[in-house]
Amino acid sequence: MPLLTSAPEIPPEEREQILQTIEMFEVITQANPQDCQSLEILKDAYQRVGKSAEFLATARTLGDTYAELGQYSAALLEYEGILKNAPASPEVVAALREVEAKLQKGGQLKAPDNHEGAIDLDFRAAVSENSTLIATPSTVRHGGPAPAVARKRAGRGEINLRDDGNDALAKILIQHRIATEDVVGPALERVHKKNAELGEGAMAMSLIDEIARRGSYETEYLLSGVLDRGKFAFAPLDYYDIDRSIVRMLPENLTLGRLMLPFDMMSRTVMIAMANPFDALGKEAAQQFLDYNVQWHLASPSAIFRVLRETYRIEK
């Protein structure tokens, strides 16, 4: 972690965007106190606008969280960074000694290979029988533009529309008794059919949205069920002012066709909201287009619909 110095001068518009990012991620981390990826974003944002006290407090929270999760090397980096940037705190020194001792004993849980990497879900594990969702570290970095083959694969005609993660989402909802099979089955069939017939510039249907409509479920209830079992970060898009140019960082076949919404950037990280976090092929295609780290979030389908309509000027 670099030494904390006075914040560099940044343009007023960029500063305003960072302050909006801070406001949003304060909400996210309050709702998900152990969401390390969001804490990392929040810490970086505080540092960029010179909020030293908040930066150090978030670093402490992040260090404690890593320690609780058994990621002792990552916790060590946070505690060392705090001690470099602020007068020695007995509590931080004690926490540092504790994780050092655990590392010396060969702790069973290892920290992520890249401390700045985002946390992603093991989507393939989710679709196997009797499986549970597992949080695994992954950093998405690309050294340059995606090759032509990758870009072509990302086109709607090259990705199997039935392999859009909706089957996996349906299985999770049924297996964990979040929604009943007699509602999920017909909803899944209709979503597959409608999405296969999408015209140019049309938005895909959301399985969560269709299940809520058919089964009289509250959308918040369905989203909470997915969040609880996937430990996924939630993006409250309704409270966020989104720059249309960020949305357009991905092509329409991914934003409109697969309900994937880039909604913010912080340093080398792009935050993308999804209506279905199990769309592994869509994620792979998006990563091919972006020369950034990618952080994935679950968002309300209705909020994604609204932003996409405003961005592409689509009639409701």
Image (spheres, rainbow, N blue to C red):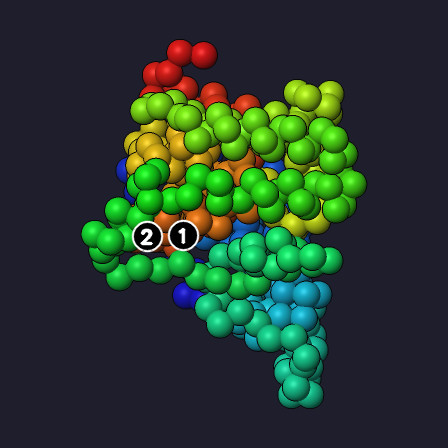
The answer to whether residue 125 is visible is yes
Circle 1 residue: 284
Circle 2 residue: 288
Q: Is residue 316 left or right of residue 176?
A: left
Mark 2, Cα crowd under 10 Å, few <14 / some 14-19 / many 20+, is many
Name the residue rendered at 44%, 31% in the picture.
Answer: 196
Q: What is the x, y in percent for residue 90? A: 68, 71
Residue type, label 2 = Gln
Name the residue rendered at 74%, 35% in the picture.
Answer: 181
Tags 1 and 2 touching, CB below 8 Å: yes
Q: Is residue 160 left or right of residue 228?
A: left
Q: What is the x, y in percent for residue 310? A: 39, 19
Give the CA separation, mark 1 to mark 2. 6 Å
Query: From what the image shows, is residue 214 above or below residue 192?
Result: above
Mark sitting on residue 72: none
Q: What is the x, y in percent for residue 231? A: 65, 50
Q: Is residue 11 left or right of residue 69?
A: left
